Image: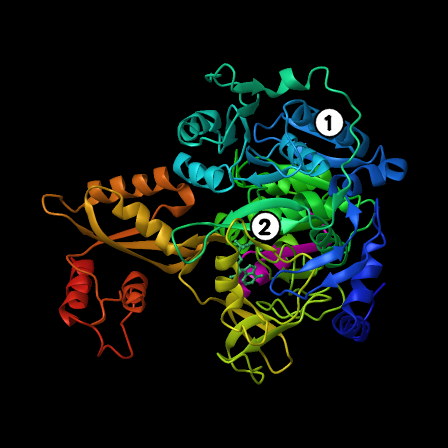
Amino acid sequence: MIRTQEEYQQLYRKSIDLPEKFWGDVASEFHWFRKWDRVLNWENPPFAKWFEGGKTNLSYNCLDRHLAARGNKPAIIWEGEPNEDRRVLTYAELHREVCKFANVLLNQGVKAGDTIAIYMPLVPELAIAMLACARIGAIHSIIFGGFSAPALVDRINDASSKFVITADGSWRRGNLIELKKIVDDALKNTPTVKNCIVLRRAANAIDMVSGRDLWWHDVMTGASEYCSAAELDSEHPLFILYTSGSTGKPKGILHTTAGYMVGTHLTTKYVFDLREQDVYWCTADIGWVTGHSYVVYGPLSNGATTLMYEGAPNYPDVDRFWSIVERYKVNVFYTAPTAIRAFMKWGNEAPKKHDLSSLRLLGSVGEPINPEAWIWYHEIIGGGRCPIVDTWWQTETGGIMITPLPGITPTKPGSATFPFFGVDAAVVDDKGEELPLGQGGFLVIRKPWPSMLRTLWGDDARFREVYWARFADKGYYMAGDGAVRDEDGYFWILGRIDDVLNVSGHRLSTMEVESALVAHEAVVEAAVVGFNHEVKGEGVAAFVTLGPGFEKGTKMADALKKHVRDMIGAIAAPDQIHFSEALPKTRSGKIMRRLLRDVANGVESKGDMTTLEDLNVLAKLRQQEEE
Ligand code: WT7
């Protein structure tokens, strides 16, 4: 048990100086079919091997390991968006369902190492499907339910998924989302997919393709409740999760079994300070990494009760979240700043209507939390008594990297404070030299950590290039964020240093949106930048040049927004569309995004414009804004 900042510092030093001892001790808490020979093999950077030679299973460690002591304890408390939909699954029940579904997959011919795409609503069956994959060593690739058919096609094909698991439909703010229909569209262009398992969720009418599509309830009928967990190598791939990079092609982040298990376990335990009777709620969708690590794997590996809510925070009313906190007496609550800012906008009445006194600890993730939102969260939701843990991490890091420890680290609103155990974070200049306090630079991680990504699926070269090339001589991982440490050594994250936007806590590549736009017949050229958005943090602004014969105006703007939504998904739909005859470029033809950002934010452009090819372009753009 850690009680003071001094104790944290001591343990932190130990974790950095003797990482193998530190992580070996943590890993000993788990069940191993075979103990590892070596905690870390870093002989061939950037390809790490953790717990080399060990054999284990994450599904076993999340379920079977708890059966004796926690068989009747709720593992998942679920609430659907339609208010009457409620379910509780105990550890014993979850174990049984996972075993059955694992047998279903085996019966369908799924083998260890096969990839399976999952495109589902936030229902218990999603967790069941994940844990069943992990049980037999199939690699899950979960695709957020908000992505469109073309986005689904890219991700299914990149991972060569053989199976798709989906549902007929899902509910969002009272609207039906026809998931199966989107899958049907996608499967026209995915040669590797053999079968599709469909959960009945919304009971909407769907087409079932005979020979390809199977109902979940049919295949589960009669499936055996016994399925031994496969004895998997520590480095056996666990999942692929796609995230946006600075090119148009999403990156398949690969996480493997043992290191991810150990990393998410320990961060969940310490950062959320879990107690046996706690009801823990992370509001993230499982389609994002936060849901993987802190709705499913981290909480279950700790034997915790994890709450899942399927729907929107403002359905049927803006107090939905607070009614859930009250109903289940939630103790630990983890959400994103964008949600907090939306709640602020919706007013204090909604939370005030409910008894939130069960809350003990609040968390934040996804983007820097502005001090105003931090204070509101602390006062209005936390009643002034709950510590807030502002956790910095990434899809790539697998688990939380920079974070306060509740009750131990003195917090400052807006700072993620200090690195977690085993995380050697630093702020460096472009040569990799650590910068003095107060100077902003690149955020790097100087040593490998257990839950780190292992590669980009099928693309070792890009993995090296994106994360390790910049500081190759030092062997540092480049996070892609800027950061600064203040006079007390606290880390402050300054935001992305690449062409990646952070829209509502989700990563979006400007290039991806640009390629979607230029795929529209009317668009000749497009540039996408971020601008400050009151709720989303960053909004999407698109500057487009139309081809001859196409007319600018609201109708065209709406058509382009819809087009991006259809190509990628609603999160990518531009908030602003600016029509321009040309885009401001340097003499070498590079679009000057800095200037476009100024236009999108409605501020004057300052600084050097001598490389701007045609100053007229900018003047025209601004003039248009005023029209
Ligand atoms: C990027 C990672 C990790 C879960 C959700 C997002 C930004 C994340 C914070 C924070 C400031 C943050 C960074 C990071 N970010 N958490 N607490 N403070 N910025 O995962 O989609 O992989 O995005 O989100 O820019 O690089 P992701």
Say which quarter of the image contains residue 297: top right
Q: Which sits in the foreground, 67 or 78?
A: 67
Distance (Cα) linking label 2 and label 1: 26 Å
Image quadrant of residue 394? bottom right
Q: Nearer the viewer, residue 449 or 331?
A: 449
Q: Which residues are magenta?
A: 356-378
SS at badge 1: helix
| The label number, if any, that marks residue 97 in the structure image | 1
Q: Is residue 531 left or right of residue 415?
A: left
Of 535 and 530, nearer the camera is 530
In the rendered image, residue 364, in percent from the top left (x then y), is placed at: 61, 56
Does the magenta portion include 189?
no
Quadrant location, ligand no. 1: bottom right
Give the structural element (helix, strand or loop) at label 2: strand
User: Could you tell me residue 299's position as x and y percent?
Assistant: 73, 46
Quadrant containing the N terminus is: bottom right
Q: Residue at x 73, y 15 (%)?
A: 222
Residue, disc 2: 254
Which colour scheme appears in the figure? Answer: rainbow
Query: Amino acid type of disc 1?
Result: Glu
The quarter of the picture where residue 52 lies is: bottom right
Amino acid carrying mark 2 in the image: Leu
Q: Please give left or right for residue 98 compared with residue 287 in the image.
A: right
